[in-house]
Amino acid sequence: MAEDNTTKLADVQIDDNAETQRVDPWTVTASKAVNYDKLIAEFGSNKIDSALIERFERITGQKPHIFLRRGLFFSHRELNEILTLHENKKPFYLYTGRGPSSGALHIGHLIPFMFTKWLQDVFDVPLIVQMTDDEKYLWRDISLDELRKITISNVKDILACGFDVNKTFIFSDLDYMGQSTAFNTVVLKIRKCITFNQVKGIFGFGDSDNIGKISFPAIQAAPAFSASFPQIFGNAKNVKCLIPCAIDQDPYFRMTRDVAPRLGYAKPALIHSQFLPALQGAQTKMSASDMNSSIYLSDTPNVIKKKINKYAFSGGRDTVEEHRKFGGDCSVDISYQFLTFFLEDDDELAKIEKGYTSGEILSGELKKRLIAILQEIVKTHQDKRSEITDDVAHEFMRSRKLKYTY
């Protein structure tokens, strides 16, 4: 594979002065914290720099989202081309997804959807959301009936971010694969372009993995091509897409980008986010499988308070006296890391960083501020989600034309 076969998952294990990390679609671990600059180098993506952010603001007329301003969406592939399309009033669309694995999302799952909603508002373009329930069936010990329930529950959480039914199509692989000849045709074409050796090299599959896993990457790749959705794009089979996603999903789309020109399709552009760390520390990302590492969108205010106070790793000193004298370490303090994602006010965040580093602000005070913010975010989400019925979710998932014409 010309572009993507140079970087395999096995190559993304970095050992530098005893610091190791592994980042792939199923595993995110680091001996200290994830080194994102090294991931950019290993994956061959491009860093989002100040010049690109300035161009974004100039072309869109919008102040960049805090995720961009603070470097939380930090890496990209061909974001400049997306800005050029917008500048020239040419079409493109957004594509992101979710692998339903638990009944309630955790707050880290919200990050790509919050950012995608903002991008859709800024650019006024269609959004495709893929629910990879088939992937979870292949990788986990779970029944199809249970997966269907979880998928609808997750869709409601996604819709609580405020997406517009006239601009957004959400689909379940288990359902849409049986409905769309066009989608299945694109999947088949992708599969023909990728050898077993290539898929093993990219994803690390072994001889004992079921054949469903080996063929699945083509399904996640297909929504990156507008030919998969004739009900939305008509005969426009080469509309470029932008994929907001966490950096661990990049192997899928390196493969997709390599296949695209062989099929006569536009390469998808990507914009990568950092991970929201687990409460216990930045060595891994927040996980839905560990109740104590995560803040769930179904948690009560009291549960949120208890989790932050008990589990959120502190960068503070052992005693108040030491903390006042030497200050705290924001680079490892989970409460501060969470604030960089969820505290909107740049000035307040800067004051907190200065105060905590100098020792003026104690760890308990930092946690108290985070608790209040998370309680508000989760309560607002729960209120919006309560208004989303099964009928509303199913309407978003109905195959149909959106408001755009091609």
Image (cartoon, rainbow, N blue to C red):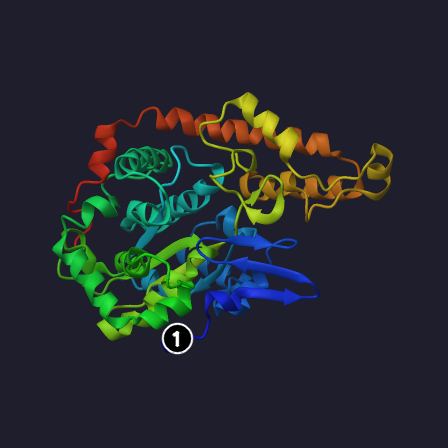
Q: Residue at x 36, y 42 (%)?
A: 141
Name which quarter of the figure residue 369 lies in: top right
Q: Is residue 188 left or right of residue 351?
A: left
Residue 18 visible in image = yes
Identity of the amino acid at label 1? Glu
Secondary structure under badge 1? loop
Which of 121/25 is in front?
Answer: 25
Name which quarter of the figure residue 31 lies in: bottom right
Q: Residue at x 17, y 53 (%)?
A: 405
In the rendered view, would you say 209 is above or below 276?
below
Residue 71 visible in image = no
Q: Residue at x 28, y 39 (%)?
A: 164
| Residue designated by label 1 | 3
Residue 351: image x %, image y %?
69, 40
Name which quarter of the figure residue 343 lies in: top right
Q: Residue at x 25, y 34 (%)?
A: 393
Q: Residue furthest bottom?
A: 2
Residue 306: image x %, image y %?
61, 25
In the rendered view, would you say 103 is above or below 237?
above
